[in-house]
Structure formats: structure tokens, C-alpha cells
Image (tube, coloured by chain):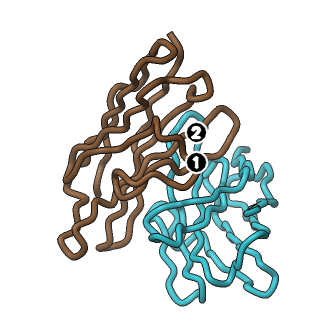
Amino acid sequence: EVQLVESGGDLVQPGGSLRLSCAASGFTFSTYNMHWVRQAPGKGPERVSYISSSSVTIYYADSVKGRFTISRDNVKNSLYLQMNSLRVEDTAVYYCARASMSSSAYFDYWGRGALVTVSS
Amino acid sequence: DIVLTQSPDSLAVSLGERATINCKSSQSVLYNSDNKNYLGWYQQKAGQPPKLLIYWASTRESGVPDRFSGSGSGTDFTLTISSLQAEDVAVYYCQQYYNSPPTWTFGQGTKVEIK
């Protein structure tokens, strides 16, 4: 069974930093592209970042470019999101999501999410 | 940036009746290179992450009941639930992919309830 489990969510002050982790199991992690997707309270999802299976290709949403860094460890079957210079508008549930093998255009499995709250 | 606009924002349908959700894209998501519409549909139940239902505008994900169907091409798309069940109460999102530069965008969501 595919499982994605996020951790690291917390309450942080504006300007602070946080590192999210996602532990993957139940599939060959090293062969799948991965995403981080966030969802602010009462809003639709927003794709934050993408990393290819070998970490060669990385994309960021304009809203987080220069502040967030995505990475992965295919030995540890883990995905990471380093978030710096956090803003109030970064408050959201952050989901680790697997890119569909049919196409990286879609997200076929999602974790339960980690809540990040940015507030003073 | 491509914008996806869903309609209606919410709808209430009787059990066993049809529910129809529309999604309009600000530009075509049909790629000439492979003749595919890069449009997906997701279901999100309360307190849960989104679940992929439909991709390529009309292909059902494995395990998704056949009462869910997708249609449309170019800029206008529809998700239809042919016979609404109690477990279908959720918010539904359309999502598109554009490759230059690579961007993934979701609609604002449509809430489906039982009448």
C-alpha cells in the first residue's frame, strides 16, 4: 500500500524557517517524481514545488521561489521541503504528493498533510 | 497564467440524481503534440487530502466508480456524477498542467451536498 507521511509542521513566526519531511513507503520511491502541494484554509490546492526522480529537474511556484528548497533522499525514501523567510500567507496544510506514472501532470497519491502556521 | 473557473461554487443534489460540475480554462489545455487534454479532476472529502478521479479529461483512475465521468476538450470540461451517493459528498477540483513554463493550477472548487 502506498503511504506518504508528512512531518515537521509547526507554528512559526514571520521570517522564520521550517523543514518538512515526507516518508514514502509501499512503492519504489526512486522511480517517481514528487511534489509538494499546499492548501490554505478554505482554499483550493496550490502546487508549491516539483522534483524529478533523480533530482535533476526542480520547479517552484513563483510565490515561493528563492525562499523554499525541495530535495529528496532516494536511499531514505524521503522528500523534504526547506522553507525560509516564511510569511503569513504561507500558512497552509502542506501535502507530499506523488506524480502519476501516467504523467507528472497529475498527483495520484497524497499524504495526510502537515499544518504550517505562520503567525506572530 | 492559466486560470481555471469552476461552476457552480456549490450544488445540492438528491440521492440517485445527476450532478454536473463545469470547469473553464482561460486557455486551451489540449496539446497538439499528443492530442491530449491536460485536465484532471479530484475529490476532497472533509479532513482528507484530495483524491485523483479523472485524468486526460476523461480517463478514470483505477478503482474510481464508473458513475464518475469526465468530458470536454480545449477550454471547457465537465465532471458528471451519474447517480449521486451519500459518500460522494465532497469538494471537487479541476486541475490543469501547462508545460511552458511547467505550471500546475487548480480551480477554486465545487462543493457537492445532498438535497
Judging from the image, mark 2 belongs to the subunit labelled: B
x and y, in percent, of residue A111 in the image: 71, 56
In this view, the residue in front, A69 or B74, is B74
In this view, the residue in front, A18 or B101, is B101
From the viewer's perspective, is residue B103 above or below residue A116?
below
Please tell me which residue is depicted at 35% across the width and 25% down the height of the picture: B8
Chain in cyan colour? A
Q: Mark 1 highlights which residue?
A: B51
Q: Quadrant of residue A78?
A: bottom right
Where is the C terminus of chain A found, in terms of image quarters?
Answer: top right
Residue extending farthest to the top is B115
x and y, in percent, of residue B69 in the image: 39, 41
x and y, in percent, of residue A66 in the image: 53, 73
Task: Categorize mark 2 by other alpha carbons within 10 Å: few (<14), some (14-19), many (20+).
Answer: some
Q: Amino acid at mark 2?
A: Gln
Please tell me which residue is depicted at 60% across the width and 21% down the height of the picture: B86
In this view, the residue in front, B86 or A78, is B86
From the viewer's perspective, is residue B110 above or below residue A14?
above
